Image: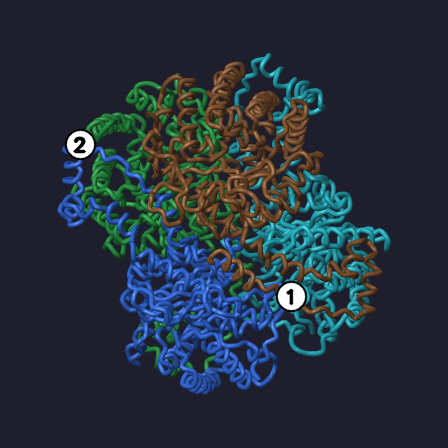
Chain colours: A blue, B green, C brown, D cyan
Amino acid sequence: MTYFHHISPIRFEGADSQTPLAFRHYDAKRVVLGKSMAEHLRLAACYWHSFVWPGADMFGAGTFERPWQQSGDPMAQARAKADAAFDFFVRLGVPFYTFHDTDVAPEGANLAEYSSHVGAMVDVLEAKQAETGMKLLWGTANLFSHPRYAAGAASSPQPEVFAYAAAQVRQAMNATKRLGGANYVLWGGREGYDTLLNTDLRRERTQLGRFFQMVVEHKHRIGFAGTLLIEPKPQEPTKHQYDYDSATVYGFLKDFGLENEVKVNLEANHATLAGHSFQHEVATAISLGIFGSIDANRGDPQNGWDTDQFPNSVEELTLVMYDILKAGGFTTGGFNFDTKVRRQSNTAADLFHGHIGAIDALALALDRAAEMIKHDALAAFKADRYIGWEADFGRRILGGEYTLDTLADEAIRGDLRPNHVSGQQEWLENLVNRYIYR
Amino acid sequence: MTYFHHISPIRFEGADSQTPLAFRHYDAKRVVLGKSMAEHLRLAACYWHSFVWPGADMFGAGTFERPWQQSGDPMAQARAKADAAFDFFVRLGVPFYTFHDTDVAPEGANLAEYSSHVGAMVDVLEAKQAETGMKLLWGTANLFSHPRYAAGAASSPQPEVFAYAAAQVRQAMNATKRLGGANYVLWGGREGYDTLLNTDLRRERTQLGRFFQMVVEHKHRIGFAGTLLIEPKPQEPTKHQYDYDSATVYGFLKDFGLENEVKVNLEANHATLAGHSFQHEVATAISLGIFGSIDANRGDPQNGWDTDQFPNSVEELTLVMYDILKAGGFTTGGFNFDTKVRRQSNTAADLFHGHIGAIDALALALDRAAEMIKHDALAAFKADRYIGWEADFGRRILGGEYTLDTLADEAIRGDLRPNHVSGQQEWLENLVNRYIYR
Amino acid sequence: MTYFHHISPIRFEGADSQTPLAFRHYDAKRVVLGKSMAEHLRLAACYWHSFVWPGADMFGAGTFERPWQQSGDPMAQARAKADAAFDFFVRLGVPFYTFHDTDVAPEGANLAEYSSHVGAMVDVLEAKQAETGMKLLWGTANLFSHPRYAAGAASSPQPEVFAYAAAQVRQAMNATKRLGGANYVLWGGREGYDTLLNTDLRRERTQLGRFFQMVVEHKHRIGFAGTLLIEPKPQEPTKHQYDYDSATVYGFLKDFGLENEVKVNLEANHATLAGHSFQHEVATAISLGIFGSIDANRGDPQNGWDTDQFPNSVEELTLVMYDILKAGGFTTGGFNFDTKVRRQSNTAADLFHGHIGAIDALALALDRAAEMIKHDALAAFKADRYIGWEADFGRRILGGEYTLDTLADEAIRGDLRPNHVSGQQEWLENLVNRYIYR
Amino acid sequence: MTYFHHISPIRFEGADSQTPLAFRHYDAKRVVLGKSMAEHLRLAACYWHSFVWPGADMFGAGTFERPWQQSGDPMAQARAKADAAFDFFVRLGVPFYTFHDTDVAPEGANLAEYSSHVGAMVDVLEAKQAETGMKLLWGTANLFSHPRYAAGAASSPQPEVFAYAAAQVRQAMNATKRLGGANYVLWGGREGYDTLLNTDLRRERTQLGRFFQMVVEHKHRIGFAGTLLIEPKPQEPTKHQYDYDSATVYGFLKDFGLENEVKVNLEANHATLAGHSFQHEVATAISLGIFGSIDANRGDPQNGWDTDQFPNSVEELTLVMYDILKAGGFTTGGFNFDTKVRRQSNTAADLFHGHIGAIDALALALDRAAEMIKHDALAAFKADRYIGWEADFGRRILGGEYTLDTLADEAIRGDLRPNHVSGQQEWLENLVNRYIYR
């Protein structure tokens, strides 16, 4: 009898369903713009928040009573955790899952133990995947929880820590490849600083650059076909993290010649902590050609830390979905629920409610965004707004036919007196609401 | 009889001076670390906030009674303003000033009038400079106040607006060259967006890139020897500005091949609006090799807009100064007071108090930072902290001698178990206070 | 031919309407929970942002071309403005409007002129109201734009400024009474401080308290039947405003014995600037018994100033509406659009788009909230959650039957070991979305 | 051999001391404005952050190696912790300490065990106090860490939780009385909400009010002579806490008739999380007559959570100290270091560095503030600024001699045209720096 035995597999029942635990909008096989909802969304549940975190916060102990988190033999617990996790994934009905190395296997006392543990658990996961049909969206290595990483991993002041991290990443990448992972994620959880007083920014950035180059080289060496993803976050637990946001990551990638090798895994709550809207980060990554995948969650607009709540704003998600669809949709990426139930939500059912609501919100957003694209009033508006840049004068400017001098001369000669043309923001906002509230 | 006639030239009188308007710490000729204070700080006062702004805010009318802001013939006013400004600069005793084109000359009805006005006023400024010995730290063009720029200048949806901006920048660059300006600044006051709904990020970024390439080409063509500077700001008045912060600007410069041509003019208040400390932005720009100049001001930690207050925290400025000194000090840059007195501070004396306090704070910071460098405990600490990277193992890692595989193997073979070493943040903070509060 | 002559009166056309300027959801006469939509929402348009503001911001000149804002005789302009405003109100089809004294009449050179101007314009407004059927939701006095109020009005260091403010408020209250206003609003636009260094908090708070007491006494003396409303705002343009938020205002009212005389006019953007959600401020005011009216707008989550945008989040508004309906709905209050179009939205149509979208969003929110109340799952959940407080033990605790000692003794004697019960936040959030996305 | 055996007792050695662990500015016996530094500052170290917290954060395990935090018999650990704590307090040389009940004693399985544990440890503490001369600044009860308090303590939906909390508070108050505590603190760590969807604000506030009334009654019953203190905090771990800030607490106290019974314990980092400056909260509490004590720490201006860093800004602390001194100084309150070393600062010495730097910063601030008071230019400025309110007209207004009507009439009759008078903020800021940087 499993932890989730009392929860029936979640089914699509339509908007009017009165079943507490059912999908109202996510119909995996329903075709939207030529692909099924499942293919569009590529949903993933995570190990980290849902199976490792005990419901503790900085001011209080864990409130959950997950059997696999009780004391006992670490490997036995890891197996029990895998049982529970896959039981959950299957009942929920998402096609993908994600994990950190130390989510699935005990850390051990040293690298030898670590390797042995991870190796054994990869066997377990492989069997679970075969048994259930679950697929791996991405794997990653936890380079931030152990005290050795208190001052960073690749950016640590100690090369031995860098080397330890390299061993973990090698193992995690190899595991991801073996499990058929679609991507491999690098999150620099403590790659940043607590104070500039003890930090050499240039040196640490160089270390990071070298680390990522080694990772890229390894990917090609082992023939990993997935995408490498950096996950930007501006701060927390560090005062400042090097992978602040998409634009910062882009400059870093350019500097180390990695802009064609690495993309970004964007998290909604990280975007807002960085002072951006979620849509901004998605649109920016797309415009820079580095959009990869999404950690779908939300923050609290009044709280200044990573609350990792389940996304539930269809209004916000529709615009994000619109941008993703316009960019061609995910390739290897997907929507991973890097989300945790609130500490007060301590039951097994709460874990389902969180995921179900988020999945339905994404399904609604997909549906609305698809409608927006069918009659693409926004695209038409933009085409009209920038029309001058498609005409002769605009093309010649961007084509390099003018110098500052010749263009200035032409502006004076032509006595240009351009008038401002309304940006019609309010009308466009209303238009979007028309699609959302049909 | 001038507006400031009742204010005697400001002199250095030492810390115990009881004179209300005197320098207590800024002794222009005092030599610190081999250079005079004046040479280190390269202080500049600005036209914009001190002579153009009438003391208005979004909720109220101007409170100042500057005679040159009253109604009348625009060119006569411009001349009166120049008289007042240079009178102020000289009485204050700073060596440099800064301006936007439309600060010094009336905008006019079209580019022909604009050119004529700016041309006439450059003659005036040139004569003023000759007469007073004042020098120009930088010039710039105002591409954000006129309604035509409501949707941006180089990033405008209308190529005619781009062309108008080109004409202004050409004129402002030429004026800056003729006046011997040490730098030319580009601030993208509205180069950003109000809503993503009507904005094509990729297109606008491409426009901006082309604009800056034209500016660089023009600089070389006219033989302008100064430095080109971009001034990052994250937002306001736009929702989001493309030049968000130093790291964002760096990625942009790399993309358009401009990273060796353009540096940054950093403003303290812009740094904090972007979610960074002032020191962070300075340290980041230095680490990326794009540090140029400073707009010395401060924001209010509780207010979310650009308050542009006079800097007065010696604690904050000392760390910034330490980083600048360690990086070799300014070359063409300097400390420009992009600052405004509070709307309630409506007298001529208030304008002096603001500048004097800021200058004394910078002088104190210079003095403290120089002491820090004489016995450079911070540098010694860092050298010790990263010592492993200077030893064999670290050098070989960064030198490219390891792949992820060989490094991981070595970590396992050596059974590496690195322990965390204290970062000693509290001790370092205390050490800094020892220098500041000798 | 009026400024808005090309805009046809806005009509309800239903969700599928293709008319650009039409209501899709606001059907004034449609009955919801026993009252018409118009009676529920009590919509008001404002003079201030829509007819007085020229589209200027701190970095640029006005972009609008409203004829009544051009230079000319102030009283003639005021009349033209009234013509345009009422033409707009009527075409839009809202039942109420709101104004500051100096929105509708020129300030004049002194109080005598001011009184004469306001008096004349009240005649105009009275005639307009009679002619159009428009009603006044509230009037107020502008005590923050003129330089005399730079340091506050009632909290000014100068009693003469207090007296000047008293004269304006008397006139504005009397005008509001004569025009049948449903409320009178007091917004302390500069009742706060720029720096604590020159501010005596206790003294200024005492002045404010006395001022409000005088206002309350005047209300009763003249027999004004409407509600007095304080509008909380935390900051901007001041560093800190005394009426920070609802909870702060409540403490102030208690201190001066005004808690039964004055309520609050809550603005969404002020709530978020104060670090609260909009719903928080509404729920707090209701729980304290001081809820009065709403300035319906929104801020930008990434911008730290009062953007005063048109509300368009049905998700946010539905929860606010739910709370208001549960509290019995508005009595004298209503939804006033204290909103401005973006500076780039410079056409007459933009002004309509902004209002129409906001009205439709409120209508949708009303519709969804009403559904929530019909099957009030939230109320049922809360009733169940707090059920222990309705049972004997809870009632006796709150009824004062226990001291700390006797209660502690009973807890020990009974060996109480209460377990945490899930708060089911995720389920509740999903439930709300079920109502919003039927 | 104790954990701190290698640290010599910290002595005052003067500003030029080269000893790493020594006071440079805090000379306990030095008399300033008639009292010793020790009497002014009433310094306290805390159990909570320094002896209970293991150096963990939300993303990583503890980095510290405190022997008393290892596994073992809870009461034996509690005794070892007390040994270490008092050894630390004595070596540091502060006169006071502070604790939560569960900091000093194991929680136990139920209230009986809890009572027994706390009782036993109070014996230990009493002996320690007698032995060392240490005094208790305040005690408190931890009503937020145990899962039972996940939804609050006094504001819990379950009356049994309220009762459990009552038992803890009774025990902690009695312990505080027995140990001669100068104050008793109430911090509502989870007295707030995570979502409004499941929360009845009015009900929970009523519960809180009743709880505090019971506490006040108990204080008088047992004859506790100390002060009751509420510690405001706006949020974290909850989304929103009822004791948001001083002004909110004041309204709450007024409502329940407690404003003469309870004061506030202000924390710098809580002030900034609430959107206020530290000085604002102190000045506000003083102006409302509820200032009690200080949790001296600081936040990080770029991080949105409670970082609880050691205070080190003399600039900030001088203004706070000035306000406290002007208000007569502490009565029962003091400066408690509610501070934690950074997670990277894992040595015993780091714990001393943190405290020493903070104490020296407070000593410097005391010294500078005392100088400010000796020649009180700020007070003189304020006296002059508000002089009109001390003259006849101002006194009559505040004295209630005018109604709005008669005052408005007088303003018109006198044709009042008050001009704005400069607030001289910049001059005042410079003046303060003159005292800080003598």
Q: Is residue B19 above or below residue D146?
A: above
Q: Is residue C312 visible?
A: yes
Q: Which chain does the residue under circle 2 lie in?
A: A
The percent coordinates of residue B296 (x first, y second) are 41, 41
Q: Is residue B190 left or right of residue C168?
A: left
* Pointer 2 local density, CA inside 10 Å: few below 14, some 14–19, many at least 20: few
> Which image quarter: residue C409?
bottom right
Marks 1 and 2 in Cβ contact (< 8 Å) = no
Marker count (numbered) = 2
- CA gap between label 1 and label 2 equals 79 Å
The percent coordinates of residue C344 (x first, y second) are 34, 39
Q: Which chain does the residue under circle 1 lie in?
A: D
SS for callout 1: loop
**Residue shown at 42% from the left, 78% from the top:** A168
Q: Which residue is mark 1?
A: D7
Viewer-side label of 1, 2: 2
Q: Is residue B155 left or right of residue A112?
A: left
Q: Is residue B174 visible?
A: no
Q: Is residue A119 above or below residue D436?
A: below
* Quarter of the figure with the N terminus of chain C: top left
Residue type marked 2: Asp
Residue type marked 1: Ile
The percent coordinates of residue A170 (x first, y second) are 38, 79
**Residue shown at 78% from the left, 65% from the top:** D125
Q: Is residue C353 above or below residue A34?
A: above
> Which image quarter: residue D411?
top right
Same-chain check, marks 1 and 2: no
SS for callout 2: loop
The percent coordinates of residue D301 (x first, y second) are 51, 51
Q: Is residue D40 left or right of residue B204?
A: right
Q: Is residue C399 left or right of residue C300?
A: right
Q: Which residue is mark 2?
A: A415
